[in-house]
Structures are given as C-alpha cells and as structure tokens.
Amino acid sequence: MQMTAPQSASAVSARMQQIREDLDQSRRRGPLQQIKIPPCPELLVQLQQAINAPEPDLGLVARIASSDVAMSATLLRIANGPLFKPVGLPCSTVGQAMNRIGLRESVSVMTSFMVQHAIPVNSPLLARFWQRSSMRAIAMATIAQQLPGMSPDLAHTFGLFLHVGMPVLLQSVRGYGATMVEAGARIDRPYIATENANHKTDHAVVGALVARAWNLPPVLMGAIRLHHDFAALGHADIDPEVHTLVAAGLIAEYLMRRHEALPEDADWAAHHESAMDWLHVSWDDIAHWEEAARQQFDEA
C-alpha cells in the first residue's frame, strides 16, 4: 500500500481537530443545528468496549449477541448458510454460531444489525439502503484483508457508515427527498454540490457528525467527511489511513455496481486511477477482490 512520508502526530491531530471544530461550529450556529442524530445503541457501546479491551471480553460479546432474538437469529442464519459451508449438524445456539463464523465476523454482523435498527430507513428514495451498505462493508473488509496494514474491522465499519448521512438528512431536513431526486438526475455537478446548494450541508458532513456523536475512531470521522473529496487524495496534511479508506471505498463502490450490473459512476470514471495509484493495486488485484466478494454479496 502506498504511503506518504510519516506524518507527525501533531499534523494528523491538527487535521482531525479541524474537522471536529468545523462540525461543532456548524452544530452550534450553522446548518447542522436542525440535524437529529439518533443515539448510539447502548448495546453497541458495550460491544465496542468488550472488543477493544486489552483482553476481549468474549463472555460479554456472547451475552450481547443473545440479548436480542432477531440478532441471534441473524447470526444463526449466517452460520447455517452456504457462505460457511457447514458440515454436520446445523448450529442451534448463538455460541455455536459465533464459533463457526468467528469473532470478527460475529462482531461485524452484530454491529450491522444494531446500526440498522438505530437508524431505520423507510423511504422508497433509499430502497435497499442497508442492504447496499452491508455489501459495501463486505467489499471494504475483503479489500482490507488483501492490503497489509489495513484493519478489516475499521474498513467494514467505514463501509457500513459511509452514506449514513443520507437517511439522517432525510429524517431531519424538509425537502431533502426532492434534493436526492435532483442530485441523482443532474450530470452537470457532483451529488454533494446539489445537497450544499439546497441545504448548505451534505451527507458527507452529516455522516461525519454521526461518527463523532457515536464516538467512532477519528480516522473514520475524517474518511467519511472526505469520501467525496478525491482531489485531496494524497495531501500531506491528511492521515494516510484516511486516504486509504477513501481510495478503497471508491473501489468497493465499483465492485458493488458491477455486481448489480449498474454502469460506472462519475466518481469512478474521474478518480479510479488516483485511488489505484494510492493503494498500489492493479486491475488484476481488483478482479481478484471481485471474485472473493461475489458470494458474500449474494449472502448480503
């Protein structure tokens, strides 16, 4: 993976601090005042604490998994599905399911489940939103497993939250539904340009606000905030890990669109070479990732 010269901690901290301050200022006096951020589920907070402890608390993870019948059923469905090619008797308990699919995958499934229920999407304008978010998270984790130094867990969370600003805006801002229709139809300017013209903010900013409110890692907040700012790819004042997430996110979107038989989008057409150069990957690498993600896409 391509990286720039090592940055000082102060440079990285200053850039993330600038994003935080911009969000806080807009929250106090700007267009973000009207945005209603759903609270982070308490069970998700507990799950993050259990996993991030020096010694992960596996017992607490199992209790959280068993605390919701629907979440337990999701784990069992995946463990007994074709993706894990079960041999022998099917799993009948959450513990058996977690053992079969592994701790990392279990935590990813639980995180996705809780996020989806914390931020419901009921509008036809966002049909299949969480399904596509899950596919994006799968693609990100698949890419991360092939790139040394990239955390699959961080990548999965980035893919899941990347466009979370859209349903939050739809629930909070009058007229945003019409903006989505307009932004999707226009070819003369980027999607977020239409959002900003109509509402003085956009889904990248609001997604970063959700990441901040939910206490996600600063690198995720930064990458969500900058995920349409491809002109900044490689700038020395931005954490290289942010660049890597943004570049991989563009490739993940490309893989999803190919799986759905959709045409390439404008971001891919304009910026894929920069993303591939940053990651130091070839078309052969992308073809390999596509093959690795295909069956998981179908499962999602």
Image: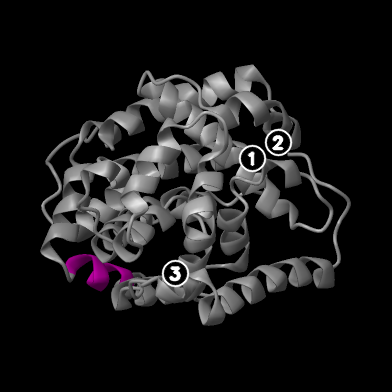
What residue sits right under mark 3 in the picture?
Answer: 51
Which numbered disc, 3 or 2, marks the residue closer to the eye? 2
Q: Which residues are magenta?
A: 61-66
> Which SS class for mark 2?
helix
* Number of numbered tags placed on the structure image: 3
Q: Is residue 65 magenta?
A: yes
Using the image, tell me which numbered label, if any, was put on residue 247: 1
What residue sits right under mark 2 in the picture?
Answer: 279
- How far apart in space, not on screen, are marks 3 and 2 (Cα)? 28 Å
Q: Position of residue 154 (x, y in %)?
A: 53, 55
Q: Amino acid at mark 2?
A: Leu
> Which SS class for mark 3?
helix
Is 182 located above or below residue 167 in the figure?
above
* Residue drawn at x 53%, y 82% as measured from the top left: 28
> Which SS class for mark 1?
helix
Q: Earlier in the sequence, mark 1 or mark 2?
A: 1
